[in-house]
Image (cartoon, grey):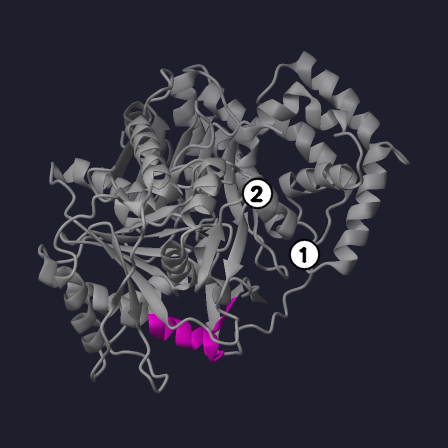
């Protein structure tokens, strides 16, 4: 199983800017969403062959076509596996989601920072010292507790997309959840549904962890003022940076961290401290300021800080990367959120962030002291920490992050010309990539599957025959119908999106057929061992749209060493972009792609609205 195929592009808020999610006041967790369909086998196999056409030469496609026809023939292996998938769909909540989470996340051995956990960097707040930091952090905690109360009491409105209710299963799992490392695969521990649900959060400052109770003895939530008093106490107990940043251990390769985790838990004090972090509702990271540079570079540095902490000499020791929810608040007004996506997904995170920004203050009362969490560090654990520090710094130094705000136009331009803004940007990304690398590549956009019970995500494959025709024609002066070809490319992406939203995407279905064969003890079907499948799943462009109401930007690392990750947040008259690439690859440069993308977007504007 190829490692680059393993990792999931992050779960974005929504894949379509054109989709309006309405809210209705109903009990939150009665899911009336229908079961996710198993797409027809012939339809998926035809879609797979079509997806290969812009990526491979005709002779290779002919070879793959024969293999696909053999796999899909009536009574053949594909038909047998399809039958079993349909049976599975009949007796499970969702036929693919559990498999997907296990395969894409929990079995992946890659480190969580950069490779998996998405980060959201939000607009800088108007404070620039520790006083403002703690005031804002207490407001944030109070707002998150209020949001949790809405989930617990069923007051969180059900979300709707195109008039259909969305599955709300993930909301209760956001709190008191943590990923636990294992030797061959990880697992998720959720403590929110136990008889005595946790009532504390973890606060990290200067690499020191504190257990902070956020409910009073009568069960009521602490107020913003009470929380602020507790954060002042934590600050007074964490003047100096701890010599050993325990949180760095969670940034390791999963197998390495799993072994260190078992060594760490041999000691009773360590076990109690780790359990306090794992069971806490969420974590709050109180970071030191990001080094101030030029405004343009500062946006990139700020996003990188939330993503990985900036390195072992910066704030990386203030993270516990296994934790489902980590809020980051810096002394310089920077803030954001980091989440572990085996449990969390974009839409619930978007709703939570919106709630934080809308919240109001409440009155206060007396509180107990926060509890500092201690660790006993022997020679073995000290060695584990040193190795983790080295590896994380190598990973961070290898990641090039380029965040910019494209101000020439926003989503209103494509809307005015009756185009999907998301599809417009996806075609622009393909064109920019082609101009830098002289080829199209396997690229994935994401569609939500939450309109189905227990649904997670599906890929939308951006490169199409229509896109290939357009990118070949755009620089050719003898081609006159460029605008028509552009429209066809945008419409082709929109059609694939609509198909995925109906549960008829191809990638989860192909994965399900492959995993069904493994489940039955069969050898992996030849169609999945074919070179073409390797090319089709080597995602050189990992993309995602974050249509949030604020000027936030999401950031994450590429899926493959020679790839990019691009996230974008389209607003009415501007678009925020983040582009990442690995420095170790000589072919990829985040800045080069960013400059080419800006030029490409301006050229597409000129194509739609010529100035001469």
Q: Secondary structure at mark 1?
A: loop
The range drawn in magenta is 145-159
Residue 177 has which mark?
none
Q: Nearer the viewer, mark 2 or mark 1?
A: 2
Residue 185 has which mark?
2
* Mark 2 nearby-residue class (10 Å; few <14, some 14–19, many ≥20): some
Circles 2, 1 touching at the beta carbon (< 8 Å): no
Residue 94 has which mark?
1
- The N terminus lies in quadrant: top right
Depth check: give the residue in front, 288 or 32.
288
Give the CA distance from mark 2 to mark 1: 21 Å
Residue located at (79% from left, 51% from top): 86
Where residue 352 sits in the image (x, y, percent)? Answer: 38, 64
Quadrant of residue 253 within the rendered picture:
top left
Where residue 58 sits in the image (x, y, percent)? Answer: 66, 15
Where residue 558 sits in the image (x, y, percent)? Answer: 42, 32
**Lower position in the chain sequence, tag 2 or tag 1:** 1
- Say if 169 sits above or below 449 in the image: below
Tell me if residue 480 can be seen.
no
406 inside magenta stretch: no
Depth check: give the residue in front, 184 or 150.
184
Q: Is residue 480 left or right of residue 230?
A: right
Where residue 98 sits in the image (x, y, percent)? Answer: 63, 52
Residue located at (77% from left, 44% from top): 40
């Amino acid at each position: 199983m190829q490692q680059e195929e393993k990792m999931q592009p992050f779960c974005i808020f929504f894949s379509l800017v054109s989709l309006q999610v309405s809210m209705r006041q109903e009990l939150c967790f009665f899911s009336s969403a229908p079961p996710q369909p198993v797409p027809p086998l012939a339809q998926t196999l035809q879609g797979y062959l079509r997806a290969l056409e812009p990526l491979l030469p005709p002779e290779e496609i002919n070879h793959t076509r024969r293999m696909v026809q053999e796999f899909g023939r009536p009574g053949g292996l594909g038909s047998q596996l399809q039958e079993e998938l349909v049976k599975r769909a009949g007796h499970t909540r969702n036929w693919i989601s559990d498999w997907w989470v296990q395969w894409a996340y929990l079995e992946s051995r890659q480190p969580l920072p950069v490779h998996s956990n998405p980060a959201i960097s939000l607009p800088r707040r108007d404070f620039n010292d520790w006083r403002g930091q703690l005031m804002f952090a207490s407001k944030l905690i109070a707002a998150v507790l209020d949001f949790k109360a809405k989930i617990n009491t069923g007051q969180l409105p059900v979300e709707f997309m195109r008039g259909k209710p969305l599955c709300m299963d993930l909301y209760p799992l956001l709190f008191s959840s943590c990923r636990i490392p294992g030797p061959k695969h990880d697992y998720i521990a959720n403590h929110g549904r136990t008889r005595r649900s946790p009532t504390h959060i973890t606060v990290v400052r200067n690499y020191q962890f504190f257990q902070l109770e956020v409910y009073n003895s009568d069960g009521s939530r602490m107020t913003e003022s009470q929380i602020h008093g507790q954060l002042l106490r934590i600050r007074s107990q964490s003047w100096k940076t701890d010599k050993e940043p325990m949180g760095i251990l969670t940034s390791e390769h999963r197998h390495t961290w799993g072994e260190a985790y078992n060594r760490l838990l041999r000691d009773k004090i360590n076990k109690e401290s780790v359990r306090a972090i794992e069971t806490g509702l969420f974590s709050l990271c109180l970071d030191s300021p990001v080094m101030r540079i030029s405004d343009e570079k500062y946006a990139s540095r700020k996003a990188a800080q939330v993503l990985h902490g900036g390195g072992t000499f910066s704030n990386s020791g203030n993270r516990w990367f296994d934790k489902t929810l980590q809020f980051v608040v810096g002394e310089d007004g920077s803030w954001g959120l980091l989440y572990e996506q085996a449990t969390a997904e974009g839409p619930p995170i978007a709703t939570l962030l919106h709630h934080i920004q809308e919240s109001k203050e409440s009155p206060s009362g007396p509180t107990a002291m926060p509890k500092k969490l201690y660790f006993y560090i022997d020679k073995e654990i000290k060695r584990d920490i040193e190795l983790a520090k080295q590896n994380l710094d190598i990973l961070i130094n290898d990641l090039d992050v380029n965040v910019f705000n494209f101000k020439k136009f926003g989503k209103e331009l494509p809307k005015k010309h009756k185009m999907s803004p998301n599809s417009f940007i996806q075609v622009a990304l393909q064109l920019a990539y082609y101009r830098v690398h002289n080829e199209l590549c396997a690229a994935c956009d994401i569609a939500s599957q939450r309109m189905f019970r227990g649904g997670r995500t599906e890929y939308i494959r951006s490169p199409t025959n229509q896109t290939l025709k357009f990118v070949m024609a755009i620089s050719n002066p003898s081609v006159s119908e460029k605008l028509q070809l552009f429209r066809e490319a945008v419409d082709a992406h929109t059609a694939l999106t609509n198909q995925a939203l109906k549960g008829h995407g191809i990638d989860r279905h192909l994965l399900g057929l492959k995993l069904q064969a493994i489940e039955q003890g069969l050898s992996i079907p030849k169609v999945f061992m074919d070179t073409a499948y390797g090319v089709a799943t080597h995602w050189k462009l990992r993309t995602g749209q974050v249509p949030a109401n604020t000027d936030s930007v999401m950031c994450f690392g590429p899926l493959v060493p020679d790839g990019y990750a691009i996230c974008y947040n389209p607003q009415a008259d501007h678009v925020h972009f983040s582009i990442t690439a690995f420095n170790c690859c000589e072919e990829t440069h985040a800045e080069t792609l960013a400059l080419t993308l800006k030029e490409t977007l301006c050229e597409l504007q000129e194509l739609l609205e010529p100035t001469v």
